[in-house]
Image (tube, rainbow, N blue to C red):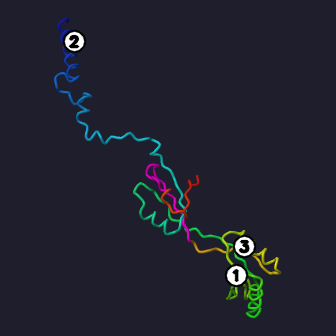
């Protein structure tokens, strides 16, 4: 019985020594050997987990800039469909003139009052058989200033209506890790905007 116990102890000792690599059979499992077998250890870099978080940036820019971004997008970017953005402007008009003669007389009147851009609008539309256009303004304040200036000089039939302009700008949503977006906002032209996507 004692001999059997002694044999068990010796076997356990041998197994322990083999497992630790003392016989050279398990050298691959020891930490020094793993370090020796590393491939290009100088290329290992620690990465900030925050830089891997996906972020979303909505870019609003001239349509050609947005199209270029879409075509040159890196593989890491996930892009939404390009959204064309129409723009509502403010149109100063004299509506509902009955005929061409009335339109010509009214045009002469407004030129005499100091209006710089006066055009007769045809063909007939919701604004009457004829109308006068005195300017289209992106800012309502510009349209209102013109109306007030001409009203002080005696104009009585001016009105401001909304007018949809052809889309010249577009929006694109870019989803990517923060590190993949790089310095995108800083590289956009001055006429562009960038903002976080809506939740």
3 or 2: mark nearer the eye: 3
Which quarter of the picture shows residue 34?
top left
Q: Secondary structure at mark 2?
A: helix
In the rendered view of the protein, which quadrant contains the N terminus?
A: top left
Residue 103 occupies quadrant: bottom right
In this rendering, is residue 21 above or below 77?
Answer: above
Q: With 180 as the anchor, is 13 left or right in this view? A: left
Q: Which residues are magenta?
A: 168-185
The secondary structure type at the circle numbered 3 is helix
Q: Earlier in the sequence, mark 3 or mark 2?
A: 2
Pick whichever of labels 1 and 2 is earlier in the sequence. 2
- Label 2: few (<14), some or many (≥20) within 10 Å? few
CA distance separating discs 3 and 1: 13 Å
Which quadrant of the structure image shows residue 29?
Answer: top left
Residue 85 within the segment the image draws in magenta: no
In the image, 29: left or right of 158?
left
Whole-percent x and y of residue 45?
Answer: 36, 41
């Amino acid at each position: 019985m004692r001999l059997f116990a002694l044999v068990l102890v010796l076997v356990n000792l041998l197994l322990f020594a083999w497992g630790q690599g003392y016989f050279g059979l398990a050298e691959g499992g020891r930490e020094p050997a793993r370090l020796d077998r590393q491939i290009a250890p100088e290329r290992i870099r620690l990465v900030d987990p925050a830089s891997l978080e996906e972020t979303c940036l909505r870019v609003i820019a001239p349509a050609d800039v947005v199209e270029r971004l879409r075509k040159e997008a890196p593989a890491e970017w996930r892009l939404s469909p390009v959204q064309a953005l129409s723009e509502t402007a403010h149109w100063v008009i004299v509506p509902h003139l009955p005929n061409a003669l009335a339109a010509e007389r009214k045009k002469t009147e407004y030129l005499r009052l100091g209006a710089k851009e006066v055009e007769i609008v045809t063909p007939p539309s919701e604004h009457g058989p004829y109308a006068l256009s005195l300017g289209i303004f992106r800012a309502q304040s510009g349209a209102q200033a013109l109306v007030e200036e001409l009203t002080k000089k005696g104009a009585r039939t001016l009105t401001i209506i909304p007018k949809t302009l052809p889309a010249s700008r577009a929006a694109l949503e870019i989803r990517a890790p923060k590190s993949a977006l790089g310095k995108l906002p800083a590289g956009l032209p001055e006429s562009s905007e960038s903002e976080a996507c809506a939740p």
